[in-house]
Image: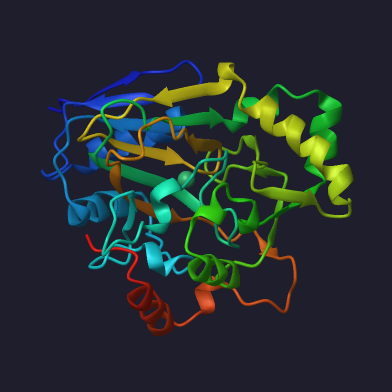
Amino acid sequence: MSKISIQPVGYALGAKVTGIDLTEPISDDDFNAIYESWLQHIVLVFPGQKIGPNELANFTQRFGELDTYDSQPFNRHPDYKEVMVLSNRRSNGVLPQTHNAGQNWHTDLSYTARPAKGTSVYCLEKPSVGGDTMFANMYSAYETLSPKMQELLDNMEAIHDVSMIEGLGKREPEVVAEFKRLNPPVIHPAVRAHPESGRKALYINERVRQFVGMTEAESKPIIKFLCEHSTSPRYIYRHYWSVGDLVMWDNRCSTHLAVGDYDPSQIRHMIRTSGKGDYYGRLAEPTAIIAEKTSLTESKNIAAGLAALAD
Ligand SMILES: [Fe+2]
């Protein structure tokens, strides 16, 4: 009989899963219960786990095929292309590109034509205080807009651009240039129907530059309003990390933010996988390349040359 317990940890979104050891086999019945609760609660927290990159990849691939991070090969784990390292630990004196990742509201890989379905992050080390992550429910964000605004957004598309990522100026210029080359601006619908729940979710965040058919000046006030509306405290779950937490979220109906509220001299070290989502996007400039078509060999050479990661 299953010992798994799933309890909400936030009103807007978020639930905690206990009574499970992710190093042990998980039955199909238990997995199905977890998957259903993931769809329902959007964010699941598995506290007290003891896993490495291999176990992380094995468990999370049950949620769907994993992304191999062709969009950012320099951030991969050296032994697992499906695992990204989020860390501020220097390697050969170099600060990893992910040391300040995720510090504006976003949904993962929306700057690619195939954004992430879900993302899973496992905490190996954390600062003594802070380093939190906040999540916002984008179903709620859409459903609480006026009918007129919903109607307007239902027919709009938005340009997502890696240049909008917070803190790019603090990273290695050569890597940033390569990151931009691999990820030219892409267009996504402003509202997406979730492929499993069927519910509409707002798909606008702080990495949106402008709406298609509008100028940047016209777009910015609307984007600003939607970002503020969608991240209102009432739609938020804030996660206070502990070492051993695995947190999994559904990127199709949420946004999140790495708060950056910690002493940067202390280590924050996490590993992550992302599931491949559906192809929603298209290139804003059709002649541009996309990361998925870039050769892996070329990407690996870039990663090795930059030596941004060591562990
Ligand atoms: Fe993220």
Q: Is residue 133 left or right of residue 266?
A: right
- Residue at 53% x, 72% y is 178
Can you say whether 241 is above or below 265 in the image?
above
Q: Quadrant of the N terminus?
A: top left
Q: Quadrant of residue 225?
A: top right
Q: Quadrant of residue 295?
A: bottom left
Q: Is residue 35 left or right of residue 189?
A: left
- Is residue 276 visible in the rendered structure shown here? yes
Where does the image place residue 44, in percent across and percent down from the top left?
Answer: 35, 32
Q: Is residue 246 left or right of residue 216?
A: left
Q: Nearer the viewer, residue 145 or 129?
A: 129
Where does the image place residue 226, in percent across and percent down from the top left?
Answer: 72, 32
Q: Is residue 215 left or right of residue 192?
A: right
Q: Quadrant of the C terminus?
A: bottom left
- Residue at 88% x, 54% y is 213
Q: How many marks?
A: 0
Where does the image place residue 41, in percent across and percent down from the top left?
Answer: 44, 28
Where does the image place residue 142, in percent across and percent down from the top left?
Answer: 69, 30
- Residue at 50% x, 79% y is 294
| Colouring of the image | rainbow
- Is residue 68 visible in the rendered structure shown here? no
Q: Nearer the viewer, residue 265 or 284?
A: 265
